[in-house]
Image (cartoon, grey):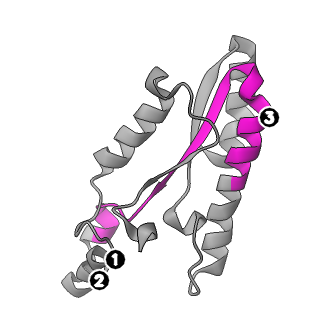
Amino acid sequence: MSGAFGCAYEIPEMLRRGAGAIVNMSSGAGVIGIPQTPIYDASKHAVLGLTKSAALGYAKSGIRINAVAPGLVETDMIAGQSPQFRESLISMHPIGRLADPAEIANAVVWLLSDKASFVLGHTLLVDGGIVSR
């Protein structure tokens, strides 16, 4: 669970324990604007604002809060699309492919781990370079 509802349930338990880490899920659309998807973009920007504000608010309580912003991920939904549409999605990524779900999961696991113990309020782009264009 991530975002506002996830934080609402996770933070009280983490405060009771005295520590914890949360990774909210956003999108590359949370750091750029896309004219065709303003409502989606606004929701993803909101996740990042929540992440930063909550991270600052709970840092001294031992709770780290960050976000991951994936690019397009190889899912059943995308696999079921026409070859032309899939190719258009792939072409958006400078890396030349879609993300494997495990690549996104690995980023989340790292942010939750002690190896990211000094990372706070950060948005980790795992987007194959889309936002770098």
Name the mark nearer the viewer: 2 or 3.
3
Q: Residues within 10 Å of mark 2 (few under 14, many from 20)?
A: few
Viewer-side residue, 6 vs 132: 132
Image location (x, y in percent) of residue 52 = 70, 46
Q: Which mark is residue 43?
A: none
Three-letter residue code for mark 1: Met
Tag 1–tag 2 contact (CB < 8 Å): yes
Image location (x, y in percent) of residue 35 = 59, 86
Is label 2 in a helix, a strand or a loop? Answer: helix
Q: In the displayed structure, does residue 133 sit left or right of residue 37?
A: left
Image location (x, y in percent) of residue 18 = 70, 13
Can residue 41 be seen at all in this image of the molecule?
Answer: yes
Task: Determine the residue positioned at 56% across, 80% down.
Answer: 34
Is label 3 in a helix, a strand or a loop? Answer: helix
Distance Cα–Cα, label 2 vs label 3: 41 Å
Q: Which residue is mark 1?
A: 92
The image shows residue 119, relative to residue 41, as above or below, that is above
Q: In the displayed structure, does residue 89 sit left or right of residue 55?
A: left
Can residue 1 be seen at all in this image of the molecule?
Answer: no
* Chain part drawn in magenta: 49-78
Mark positioned earlier in the residue sequence (1 or 3): 3
Q: Which residue is mark 2?
A: 88
Viewer-side residue, 87 vs 78: 87
Q: Which mark is residue 57?
A: 3
> In terms of image quadrants, where is residue 84?
bottom left
Q: Residues within 10 Å of mark 3 (few under 14, many from 20)?
A: few
Three-letter residue code for mark 2: Ser
Image location (x, y in percent) of residue 1 = 58, 41
